[in-house]
């Protein structure tokens, strides 16, 4: 199942350990990571972002146009979630018919994340949550998940309210889009790292 996984810890060291653990699971074939970012909540209700999760430090404040630029670069469910957490208007940077993150989920994460705490946010394909939950248990963090496909399907049902005779066709269309999104994220997996690195270098 393709999920947005959020794991919250109380230190940079632990956030780096989370990223390393998830990367190991990915290399072992236990999970597949499509996108990932590490953010820290600030006392102004904003966020800092960790430039390179493999190194100590490297935090930069997300403010003003920087938030919009980062969301535009990352895209997909991760970009939309960042927009929801930061209260940034997404506008044309996202195709809202492709993905919607539940506002309830965003509120749940925002209300749980305390100032100074760090969230590792990952779009991950996992057959079972047990691999990640067991591997991260020693770090004593808090985790949240929401299904990418369930969120999308819920949105479709809510806004379309298709007639029963159109339901089969709409379901087939959603399945085709799900397959297309999965393929695109597989391609994005490598390219997004380079895009973010290039963006940071221009700051």
Image (cartoon, helix red, strand yellow):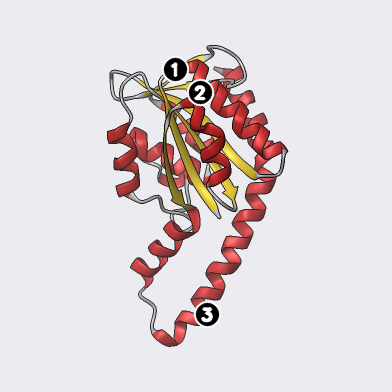
Q: Which residue is mark 3?
A: 169
Kindly check if marks 3 and 1 are in contact, taking CB atoms under 8 A apart as contact: no
Characterize the local packing of mark 3: few (<14), some (14-19) or many (20 or more) Cα atoms within 10 angstroms: few
| Quadrant occupied by the C terminus | top right
Kindly check if marks 2 and 1 are in contact, taking CB atoms under 8 A apart as contact: yes
Q: Residue at x 35, y 18 (%)?
A: 116
Characterize the local packing of mark 2: few (<14), some (14-19) or many (20 or more) Cα atoms within 10 angstroms: many
Q: What percent of the width, then of the height, locates residue 21?
A: 61, 30
Kindly check if marks 2 and 3 are in contact, taking CB atoms under 8 A apart as contact: no
Q: Which residue is mark 2?
A: 15
**Residue 100 vertical placement versus 203 (above, below):** below
Q: Which residue is mark 1?
A: 11
Q: CA distance from mark 2 to mark 1?
A: 6 Å
SS for callout 2: helix
SS for callout 3: helix
Q: Nearer the viewer, residue 165 or 122?
A: 122
- Tell me which numbered mark, 3 or 1, is placed earlier along the sequence: 1
**Residue 56 vertical placement versus 62 (above, below):** above
**Residue 101 vertical placement versus 81 (above, below):** below
Q: Residue at x 59, y 49 (%)?
A: 125
**Lateral position of residue 20 relative to residue 147, left or right:** right
Q: Nearer the viewer, residue 13 or 61?
A: 13
Q: CA distance from mark 2 to mark 3?
A: 44 Å
Q: Nearer the viewer, residue 174 or 115?
A: 115
Characterize the local packing of mark 1: few (<14), some (14-19) or many (20 or more) Cα atoms within 10 angstroms: some
Q: CA distance from mark 3 to mark 1?
A: 48 Å
């Amino acid at each position: 199942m393709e999920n947005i996984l959020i794991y919250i810890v109380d230190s940079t060291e632990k956030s780096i350990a989370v990223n390393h653990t998830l990367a190991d699971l990915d290399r072992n074939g236990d999970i597949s990571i499509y996108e990932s970012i590490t953010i820290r909540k600030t006392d102004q209700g904003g966020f800092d972002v960790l430039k390179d999760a493999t190194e100590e430090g490297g935090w930069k404040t997300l403010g003003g146009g920087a938030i919009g630029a980062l969301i535009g670069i990352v895209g997909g469910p991760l970009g939309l979630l960042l927009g929801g957490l930061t209260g940034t208007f997404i506008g044309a940077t996202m195709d809202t018919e492709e993905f919607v993150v539940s506002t309830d989920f965003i509120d749940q994460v925002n209300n749980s994340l305390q100032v100074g705490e760090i969230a590792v946010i990952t779009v991950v394909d996992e057959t079972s949550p047990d691999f990640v939950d067991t591997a991260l248990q020693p770090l004593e963090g808090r985790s949240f998940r929401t299904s990418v496909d369930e969120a999308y399907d819920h949105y479709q049902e809510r806004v379309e309210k298709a007639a029963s005779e159109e339901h089969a066709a709409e379901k087939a269309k959603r399945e085709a889009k799900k397959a297309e999104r999965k393929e695109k994220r597989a391609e994005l997996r490598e390219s997004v790292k380079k895009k973010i690195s290039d963006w940071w270098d221009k700051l």
